[in-house]
Amino acid sequence: MPWFKRPPEAQAGNRDGLETVGPIALPVDLDERVFRQKFAQFLTLLGEAGGIDPFVAALTVKHELFAKALAPAALEGLGLATLETLVETVMPARKRVWPSLEALGEAGVRQGVQALLYGAQPLAERLPAFVDAIPVAGLEDQKAIRKVRRALWDLGAELLHFRAPVQYPLMTRWVWDQGTHSGALREFVKGGDALDKVLLGTDPGVYEAGRRWLAERMAENGMYRDPEFIVDVFFAHAYGDYMRALSSGMGLMNADFGGKEDPLEVVKKLLGIDAARRTESRVKKVLH
């Protein structure tokens, strides 16, 4: 499991394709007691569902899809049909971003994705620049525009991670969102329930620090294969717990995840490996 044992390295541009993301020191402590509680529940759920292997297999397939479509040579011919296939697997984005991507057009989208994945600027600059490079189409309401921009962030985060899952941590808002002080990572902050704000920041090293901490804890408890994927699954499990607690008075699970889902179905939906509907596109059926 060498990827999280590497010493922290300064972030650099990705001109040579050798960019690394080093963890930064978090300003808060993460709670091993909370980890143990959630991990025990996680193992119970996995035991009822055939283990971790089906999740790793599904995420491996997703990675292979992204790696093939987003390789430098293939990216030169990236079309909207292929892009739709990728967006279909990004749950936070699949119902919000398509009109904006379609309006920008293939050439503009290719340019934005190229700069995001292979640009020379630091990663901390490339992801927000990707969002800014895609004008929100067809909307005037500022709240709806903000929702699309947040969904574009999640799309960019998944393009990075699932093209190169060892190289880049998953930086979606459901893992950590500094704007709302929420996300799966907050679930492990010691004393997080008593804090109004958690100032982790938005540096990519925050996400890398979180996934390395979880990977180490999981390895200590016997789950050490494919850490680049099992951490994603465990983060999704933790965020599902948060959503269920929050939704008891707000109906959020019903609105976002379809109601009476079992906990691992929510994990699949967050990771975009849930079964696609066969009758209509979930990408072109836009929700604002």
Image (spheres, grey):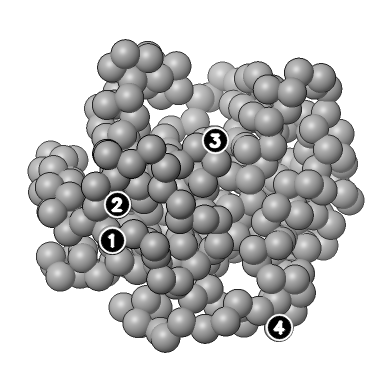
Q: Quadrant of residue 74?
A: bottom right
For mark 3, does the 10 Å Cα neighbourhood hold few (<14), some (14 to 19), or many (20 or more) residues? many
Q: Which secondary structure, mark 4?
A: loop
Disc 3 versus disc 1: nearer the observer:
1
For mark 1, does the 10 Å Cα neighbourhood hold few (<14), some (14 to 19), or many (20 or more) residues? few
Q: Which secondary structure, mark 3?
A: loop
Marks 2/3: CA–CA distance: 24 Å
Q: Quadrant of residue 53?
A: bottom left
Marks 1/4: CA–CA distance: 35 Å
Q: Which residue is mark 4?
A: 16
Marks 2/4: CA–CA distance: 36 Å
Q: Which residue is mark 1?
A: 29
Q: Earlier in the sequence, mark 1 or mark 2?
A: 1
Contact? badges 1 and 2 (CB < 8 Å)? yes
Q: Quick check: 35 left or right of 151? A: left
Disc 2 versus disc 3: nearer the observer:
2
Q: Is residue 252 above or below residue 35?
A: above
